């Protein structure tokens, strides 16, 4: 494989083995590789809780976040949020004591990243194959949709989607390149 970040899509068996005979035509041997680039643009929970992130959050954002199925910690009066200060407090106080809270917090950060153009719903991310994402490729919009649904799912689902959101917000996952990549061999 060339240097850079590439993922082999075909063949599934990792390679083909056959003898090449001069003058013969060979078909049905598909090869496929995709080029990835480092993920970028994600802003963390800390960014959205600090004055820089808080200054970007609009009343429309607050309204949109209130439409999500976010976890309300025991003893808390929100969500739904009345203002940006409550969003910041929610993000600053989050604990993993109940994974739904951490999932909700990461969901807020990713949604705000999309709403403010730091990330795009249509960006294809490589997260590696799993039972949740068999091909390893998924859009940011699909990650958000699955995270919303996981809030009412099992702990394993919540943990998985929380980790993906956290990875997006911290730029840990590579993105599929939208244009052809140059190839440099070592």
Image (cartoon, rainbow, N blue to C red):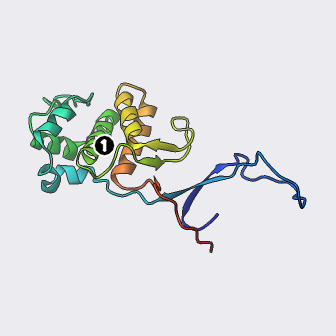
Q: Which residue is located at x 40 percent, y 33 percent?
A: 146
Q: Closest to the observer: 5 or 104?
A: 5
- Residue that extends furthest to the top in the rendered view of this protein: 152
Q: Please identify the quarter of the rendering in which residue 50 is found.
A: bottom left
Secondary structure, mark 1, is helix
Please state the horizontal and vertical placement of residue 170, each as a whole percent of the image: 35, 54
Relative height, residue 8 to residue 84 (above, below): below
- Residue that extends furthest to the front in the rendered view of this protein: 23
Give left or right: position of 146 versus 21: left
Give left or right: position of 116 versus 22: left
Q: Quadrant of the N terminus?
A: bottom right
Please state the horizontal and vertical placement of residue 184, each as a whole percent of the image: 58, 71
Q: Which residue is located at x 23 percent, y 48 percent?
A: 116
Q: Which residue is located at x 15 percent, y 45 percent?
A: 88
Q: Quadrant of the C terminus?
A: bottom right
Q: Closest to the observer: 67 or 101?
A: 67
Give left or right: position of 14 versus 50: right
Relative height, residue 185 to residue 45 (above, below): below
Please state the horizontal and vertical placement of residue 160, each as a whole percent of the image: 44, 39
Please state the horizontal and vertical placement of residue 129, each as a whole percent of the image: 56, 43
Callout count: 1
Question: Pointer 1: what residue?
Answer: 106
Q: Residues within 10 Å of mark 1 (few under 14, many from 20)?
A: many
């Amino acid at each position: 494989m060339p240097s850079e970040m590439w993922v082999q899509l075909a063949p599934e068996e990792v390679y083909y083995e056959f003898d090449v005979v001069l003058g013969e035509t060979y078909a049905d041997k598909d090869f496929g590789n995709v080029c990835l680039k480092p993920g970028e643009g994600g802003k963390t929970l800390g960014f959205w809780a600090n004055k820089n992130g808080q200054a970007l959050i609009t009343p429309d954002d607050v309204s949109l976040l209130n439409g999500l199925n976010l976890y309300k910690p025991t003893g808390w009066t929100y969500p739904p949020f009345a203002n940006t200060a409550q969003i910041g407090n929610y993000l600053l106080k989050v604990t993993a004591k109940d994974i739904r809270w951490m999932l909700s917090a990461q969901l807020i950060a990713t949604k705000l990243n999309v709403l403010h153009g730091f990330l795009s719903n249509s960006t294809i991310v490589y997260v590696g194959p799993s039972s949740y994402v068999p091909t390893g490729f998924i859009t940011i919009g699909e990650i958000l949709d699955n995270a919303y649904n996981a809030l009412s799912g099992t702990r394993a689902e919540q943990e998985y989607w929380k980790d993906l959101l956290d990875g997006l917000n911290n730029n840990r996952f590579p993105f599929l390149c939208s244009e052809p990549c140059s190839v440099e061999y070592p």
